[in-house]
Image (spheres, grey):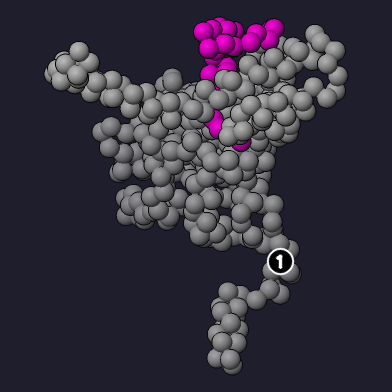
Amino acid sequence: MGSDIVATKDYHDWLTDIKRRVQSAQLKAATAVNTALLEFYWSLGADIVQKQKDTVWGSGFLKQLSADLMTEFPDMKGFSYRNLRAIKQWYLFYSQDNAIVQQPVAQTDEKPLPAKWQQPVAKLVQIPWGHNLAIISKCNTVEQALFYVRKTIENNWSRSVLTHQIESDLFARQGKAITNFKQTLPAPQSDLAREIIKDPYNFDFLTLTEQHTEKELEKELIDHIARFLMELGAGFAYLGKQIPLQVGERDFFVDLLFYHTHLHCYVVIELKVVEFEPEHAGKLNFYIKAVDEQLRGKGDQPTIGILLCKGKDKVVVEYALSDIHKPMGVSEYELTQALPDELKSSLPTIEQIEAQLKQGADDE
């Protein structure tokens, strides 16, 4: 009878369908493995905390648990004593002040995560375990940590990029620039635009003299365009420097021009190596108007301006922007590797270094 079943078309069709479903399940399992693993880590962390609270198993509890789990699952990583401590710390970090959970509740295969966990934990389990560990090791508050979790998901940051963003204190800088977006852009465009601007911008990848010029700053930024774009944030597409715009019989030049793919608008960036002055806003307003008139297309949102300066008086900036009708923001930039002028002048130039290397090669 069994051979008769195997020979039927219905059975073959059913078997083919089962194979397709298995392959589909395997694919889903592969893409969901991080989520499933981290959900397990979360529930394990809750269990560890609860057991250490309710039992008298002693300080060797975690080491014993690690040994037992590694014996039972020799091919499964993640059960080292060090990682179990990290799992516990991860759970405790987000449990502080009842930020995410009230009482730890163990998860089983039949029981989904409790509702009070689902929304915040759903974010945590979307990023790799190594990213989670980097965040809790460098952040002081749950609010700060969840900011970096969200940004990692939005921008698909690698761990090195995530670490850089935390160490450059993006949490404290993003959305902090003085702008007039609320008055000049419709909602929600105004809120989105405000979120793309930081204050201050950290140009720690540049090495300039203390008395650098605007042309030197511009050249260095373009020479390091990849790092510059990373500091600007996701969505900025570089279009060029010193973009010519003819107004009347005169030619004007925009320092840096970008297009923001999320906001669907041009972004004009003007560089000032001095303290902010009110006339800087007037000039940037003029450039934004020219870009709107000459470059902005039918589907583009209003052009935005960003003025990067060496310093600013907050009240002066607010006064200057209060009667400006084009959307713009004013931010400072920081150079953490600025060289004293006298030291920079004593260093060999690139050309001199290359000449010395060539001479050395010829001598050999």
Residue 210 sits in quarter: bottom right
Q: Secondary structure at mark 1?
A: helix
Q: Quadrant of the C terminus?
A: bottom right
Q: Per the image, is 46 magenta?
A: no
Q: Amino acid at mark 1?
A: Asp
Tell whether 188 sits left or right of 40.
left
Residue at 28% x, 32% y: name it.
299
Residue at 73% x, 33% y: name it.
82
Viewer-nearest residue: 62 or 167: 62
Q: Quadrant of the N terminus?
A: top left
Q: The magenta stretch spans which residues?
A: 102-130
In the image, is residue 154 above or below residue 168?
A: above
Residue 120 sits in quarter: top right
Q: Per the image, is 118 magenta?
A: yes
Task: From the top left corner, tell me how far across and down residue 178 is, in percent.
Answer: 59, 32
Instruction: Give the residue at mark 1.
Output: 341
Task: From the top left corner, tell me how far across and down residue 289 is, in percent.
Answer: 38, 39
Q: Residues within 10 Å of mark 1 (few under 14, many from 20)?
A: few
Task: From the top left corner, tell me how far across and down residue 261 is, in percent.
Answer: 38, 37
Residue 279 visible, this orientation: no
Residue at 52% x, 22% y: name it.
36
Task: From the top left corner, tell me how far across and down residue 114 is, in percent.
Answer: 57, 7
Viewer-nearest residue: 315 or 42: 42
- Residue furthest bottom in the image: 363
Residue 69 visible, this orientation: yes
Viewer-nearest residue: 65 or 159: 65
In the image, is residue 55 above or below residue 163?
A: above
Residue 277 sits in quarter: top right
Tell whether 17 sits left or right of 232.
left
In the image, is residue 107 above or below residue 293?
A: above
